[in-house]
């Protein structure tokens, strides 16, 4: 919820190589792992930056920056949190989600995910 509230995602230094690939305007998909597993929304990347401020609860708890490589985003569509369990969209691509940031290599899959989410949002 911190990411959605702040419209910002963070990446640890060992995933910086993936963060570096993100460009302004790239589609971003929100995949929740708790309290549900599934696609819950979509955004567009706005900008990237390296920050030295505490943002996530585990950073605050440990008093150290764990995710300094951050992406600001603009939400395109999002399922209301109260509806996540009933309305989340399962991902049917094995191994698509492995880290806190993942690259979808095939435009066909990006288009399919965006279409599924768009169709869902229009029917909800």
Image (spheres, helix red, strand yellow):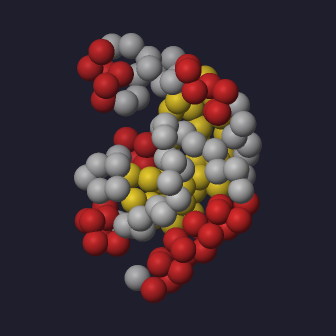
In the current view of this chain or complex, which residue is farthest to the bottom? 123
Question: Depth check: 99 or 46 in front?
Answer: 99
Q: Is residue 22 above or below residue 105?
A: above
Mark yes or no: residue 69 visible: no
Viewport quadrant of the C terminus: bottom left
Q: Is residue 118 above or below residue 13?
A: below
Residue 109 point in image, percent of width and height: 65, 63
Residue at screen point 34% across, 56% down: 37
Residue 61 point in image, percent of width and height: 26, 20
Residue 98 point in image, percent of width and height: 49, 40
Mark yes or no: residue 84 visible: yes
Residue 31 point in image, percent of width and height: 44, 53
Question: Depth check: 81 or 13 in front?
Answer: 13
Residue at screen point 37% across, 41% down: 2
Instruction: State which quadrant residue 108 falls in.
Output: bottom right
How many callouts does the rendering have?
Answer: 0
- Residue 69 falls left or right of residue 21: left
Instruction: State which quadrant residue 116 falls in.
Output: bottom right
Residue at screen point 59% across, 52% down: 28
Question: Depth check: 30 or 107 in front?
Answer: 107
């Amino acid at each position: 919820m911190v990411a959605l509230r702040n419209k910002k995602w963070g990446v640890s230094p060992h995933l910086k190589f993936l963060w570096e690939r993100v460009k302004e305007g790239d589609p971003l998909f929100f995949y929740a792992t708790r309290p549900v597993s599934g696609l819950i929304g979509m955004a567009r990347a706005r900008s990237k930056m390296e920050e030295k401020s505490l943002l996530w609860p585990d950073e605050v708890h440990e008093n150290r920056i764990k995710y300094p490589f951050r992406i600001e985003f603009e939400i395109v569509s999002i399922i209301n949190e109260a509806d996540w369990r009933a309305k989340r969209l399962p991902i049917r691509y094995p191994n698509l989600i492995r880290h806190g940031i993942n690259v979808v290599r095939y435009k066909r899959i990006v288009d399919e995910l965006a279409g599924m989410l768009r169709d869902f949002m229009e029917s909800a």
